[in-house]
Amino acid sequence: MNSVLKRPAVFALFLLPAVLFYVVFMIYPIGEAIYDGFTKWNGVSEKNFIGLDNYIRLFQDSLFWDSLLRNFWFIVFAIVIQLPIIVFVALLISKVGRRFQSFYRTAVFTPVILSTAIVGILFLFIYAPDVGLLNNFLKAVGLDSWTHYWMSDPNVNFLMILIANAWQWDGFYIIIVLAAILNIPKELDESAEMDGANIFQRTAYITLPLIRPILIVVLLLSVAGSMKALDAVLVMTNGGPFHSTEVMATYMIKVGFQQFEYGYGSAIAVMIFLFTLIVSMLVQLLNRKDVEY
């Protein structure tokens, strides 16, 4: 290793393929999207530079702000609902014997390997008003009045998408948190138990503080995924009915690929990138201040 570092040319040669890959598939598309956001372009004709017109239009576009709000609801749902469930399930699995851990890990991770299209169609069947599992279950337990047209009602349809999305991806985060929990030395837990600490105290004062860095990683991944949420919404409602489930990514696709306003669509894409960057930096900044205190 030291001999390689002493020869910068060899070091650069090894780095070159990764750098080229990163520039071609990451830096260039981002730069192109930023430039296109300042143009009026239908994808075929010449690009016309129009300055900030797309961004002025965007800040006056109520559909964009509504879609941004739903992306933030994704984040709120991830923090308030998903994260506690992820930690709780990971803790439960960590307490079962090794013989059963493999089974539970496989069970919670199975939805992750399914295609989002399959998950979306599966939940559309579950939410179906007449033959759906949810309504039939409610009828079976005597709660007929609770049956609903879940995906047609703007008051609840977005919540149904959040649940479906969480069902698919929570297993991925559970495995990450579980790995962190299992890496905690058992001696710490056993010592606390011998000193009289109950399971809730051991969890609050030993387990959770020690897995905090992993929880921050899970939170950052959730935030990034929430800001660019697309496939679940696209499969289940395509942003409808009447834009009631529209998120920024689906709105970008409709503007760019259905209305052929690639310049305006690129401006929306840039805003998705900026909002994701800002929210992720805020999470890291709050975590750093928390650690300092």
Image (cartoon, rainbow, N blue to C red):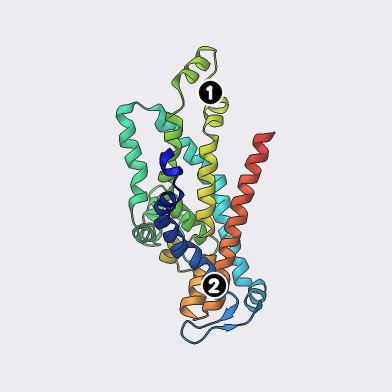
- Residue 241, percent across and down? 50, 70
Q: Residue at x 50, y 61 (%)?
A: 157
Q: Is residue 136 visible?
A: yes
Q: Quadrant of the C terminus?
A: top right
Are discs 1 and 2 less than 8 Å apart at CB? no
Q: In front of the other: label 1 or label 2?
A: 2
Left or right of residue 139: residue 162: right
Q: Is residue 11 above or below residue 47?
A: above
CA gap, disc 1 to disc 2? 50 Å
Is tag 1's residue or tag 2's residue first in the polypeptide sequence? Answer: 1
Q: Using the rendered view, name the quadrant where residue 47 is placed.
A: bottom right
Helix, strand or loop at disc 2? Answer: helix
- Residue designated by label 1: 202
Q: Is residue 253 above or below residue 194?
A: below
- Residue 88, percent across and down? 48, 35
Q: Residue at x 44, y 65 (%)?
A: 24
Looking at the picture, tell me which residue is in the foreground, 32 or 62. 32
Q: What amino acid is at disc 2?
A: Ser
Q: Is residue 245 visible?
A: no
What crowding class fits label 1: few (fewer than 14 Cα within 10 Å), some (14-19), or many (20 or more)? some
Q: What amino acid is at disc 1?
A: Arg
Question: Which numbered circle lies on residue 266?
Answer: 2
What crowding class fits label 2: few (fewer than 14 Cα within 10 Å), some (14-19), or many (20 or more)? many
- Residue 110, percent across and down? 33, 46
